[in-house]
Image: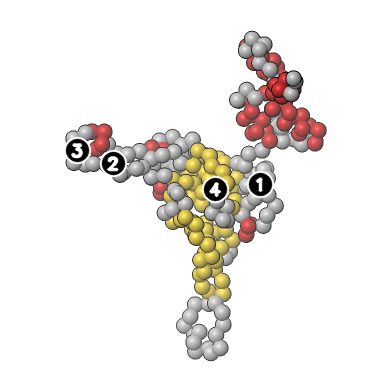
Amino acid sequence: MHWQDDSTLLIGWADQIKVARIRARPRTTTSSASANVPPLLVEITAVFQLDCMVAGIVPHPSGQEPLSLTSFLIVAYTPPDTSFYNEATEDRAQQARKVAERPELRIVSRAGEELAADALGISGFQSWGCNDYVLADIKPDGTTGRCYIVLSPHDIVIVKPRDRKDHIDWLVDRQRYEEALEVLEELEKLGDSQGGDNNASEIGQKYVEHLVAEGGLVLTRRQRHQDSNTP
C-alpha cells in the first residue's frame, strides 16, 4: 500500500491495483442516525486487473500533470509455473522447486494500460517471492525530479527516469553512432545540457573506427537513404 496523498491510498493486492479515496461521510438529517457513525468513509474509485503480481506500487508523475492524474509505477512479479509440479514422480527435475522469473519495473496508466516495462537486475531473483520486494520513492539531496529504490534481500536498486544522455549512451552501446551524433547535435543546437558528458568528437572517433573495422564497406544511414532514391 502507498499513500498518494492525504486522502488517496494505492493498493497492490495479488494481481490487482485498487485506488481507495477517503472522504467525509455525508451529513444526515437527524443527529441520532449519525451519532455512532464514523465521520469518514472509504470509496474504491478504480480497480485494474494485471497479468502479474504487484510487489510494490507508487504514483508516477507524467510531465507536468497534477499528482491526481499520475500513472502507477509497480514492481511486477510473475510467480513460477507450478502446473507441472509433481511430488509423486521420481524425476528429480519435476520434483525441484520452480524458480521465479526476473521482476520488472512497469509503468501502468490510469486506464490500466502498460506504458513501459524494464527488467530489474536483481541477484538471486529465482529464489525470491512477491513479498521479498519493496518499492519506495525518494528525493535525493541536490537533485530534482523523482527517484525510486527497489529493495530485495540482496540488492538496493536506484531507479531514475531516462534522459537524453541515457538515450545517447544506449545508441553508442549498440554502435548506432550516427543516430547518437544526430541526437547530440540537436541538443547542442537547443542549448540543452541533457547530453551530459557525451562528446561528439569521441563518438565520431568510435564511428570511424567502427567503419574501418567493417572494411569500409558499411554505408551510413543517410547514404543508404540517398542511394535508395537513385535510379
Which residue is label 4 attached to? 114
Of helix, strand and loop, which one carries label 4? Answer: strand
Q: CA distance from mark 3 to mark 4?
A: 40 Å
In three-dimensional space, the C-alpha distance between marks 2 and 3, rounded to whole angstroms, equals 11 Å
From mark 1 to mark 2, how far is it between C-alphas?
46 Å
Q: Residues within 10 Å of mark 4 (few under 14, many from 20)?
A: some
Q: Is residue 199 above or below residue 138?
A: above
The type of residue carrying mark 3 is: Thr
Q: Mark 3 or mark 1: name the one nearer the start of the chain.
A: 3
Q: Position of residue 27 (x, y in %)?
A: 56, 82
Which sits earlier in the primary sequence, circle 4 or circle 2? 2
The residue beneath circle 1 is 145
Q: Which residue is mark 3?
A: 89
Quadrant, the C terminus: top right
Residue at mark 1 to residue at mark 4: CA–CA distance = 22 Å
Residue 38 location (% of width, % of height): 49, 77
Q: Nearer the viewer, residue 135 or 14?
A: 14
Marks 1 and 4, the one that precedes in the sequence: 4
Question: Is disc 1 placed on a helix, strand or loop?
Answer: loop
Nearer to us in this view, 48 or 150: 48
User: Which residue is labeled 2 in the image?
Assistant: 84
Type of residue at label 4?
Glu
C-alpha span from label 3 to label 1: 54 Å
Q: Nearer the viewer, mark 3 or mark 1?
A: 3
- Residue at 68 percent across and 17 percent down: it is 219
* For marks 2 and 3 on the same chain, the one whose residue lies earlier in the sequence: 2
Q: Is residue 36 visible?
A: yes
Q: Which mark is residue 59?
A: none
Near mark 1 (Cα within 10 A), the count class, few <14, some 14-19 or many ≥20, is few
Sequence-wise, the earlier of marks 1 and 2 is 2
